[in-house]
């Protein structure tokens, strides 16, 4: 996503909001949440802690696992296992690594927020499936409208 935003030559800040702070050193390596790795390998802007989780509330604070999803997995465990393997392969091909530390049970997403008029676009995370190109295009289009408003207001 950062590459696409850079290519769009947006002048707006891109921020990451995280749910939990990284543990203070000294800490065992397997207890780290991976925030430093995320910031250096996968994200292109500053990261902020939202202890009150306001952003997640705006995204609906939806759980990754739902009763319906778990029910489907139980009804067809072979398909579920196959989907997990496919997701693992996609992430591996992209070089995405991760750990199971921290709160990974709440869906994240992307909000495009205009300083004066609120939320312009919302993308809800679909865990394991990445972001469709059409969604990325919509995010960039929404961000460009904010950028053009800032230029006309100046």
Image (spheres, helix red, strand yellow):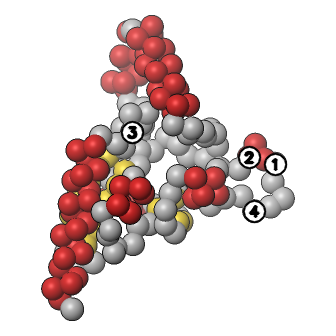
| Dot 2 alpha-carbon crowd within 10 angstroms: few under 14, some 14 to 19, many 20 or more | few
Q: Which quadrant of the rendered structure holds the C terminus?
A: bottom left
Which comes before the other along the chain, label 3 or label 2?
A: 2
Which mark identifies residue 24? Answer: 4
Q: CA distance from mark 4 to mark 2?
A: 11 Å
| Side of 6 relative to 152 (left or right) | right
Q: CA distance from mark 3 to mark 2?
A: 25 Å
Helix, strand or loop for disc 1: loop
Whole-percent x and y of residue 1? 39, 52
CB within 8 Å, label 2 to label 1: yes
Which mark identifies residue 130? Answer: 3
| Side of 29 relative to 143 (left or right) | right
Q: CA distance from mark 3 to mark 4?
A: 30 Å
Whole-percent x and y of residue 144? 22, 68
Whole-percent x and y of residue 141? 20, 60
**Residue wearing tag 1:** 28
Whole-percent x and y of residue 50? 49, 65
């Amino acid at each position: 996503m950062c590459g696409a935003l850079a290519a769009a030559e947006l002048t707006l800040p891109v921020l990451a909001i995280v749910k939990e702070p990284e543990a203070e050193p000294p800490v065992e390596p397997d207890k780290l949440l991976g925030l430093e790795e995320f910031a250096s390998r996968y994200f292109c802007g500053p990261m902020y802690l939202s202890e009150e989780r306001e952003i997640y509330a705006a995204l609906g604070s939806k759980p990754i696992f739902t009763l319906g999803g778990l029910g489907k997995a139980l009804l067809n465990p072979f398909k579920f296992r196959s989907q997990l393997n496919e997701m693992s392969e996609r992430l591996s091909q992209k070089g995405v690594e991760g750990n199971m530390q921290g709160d990974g049970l709440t869906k994240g997403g992307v909000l495009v927020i205009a300083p004066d008029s609120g939320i312009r676009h919302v993308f809800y995370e679909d865990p394991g499936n990445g972001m469709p190109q059409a969604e990325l295009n919509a995010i960039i289009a929404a961000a460009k409208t904010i950028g053009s408003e800032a230029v006309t207001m100046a």
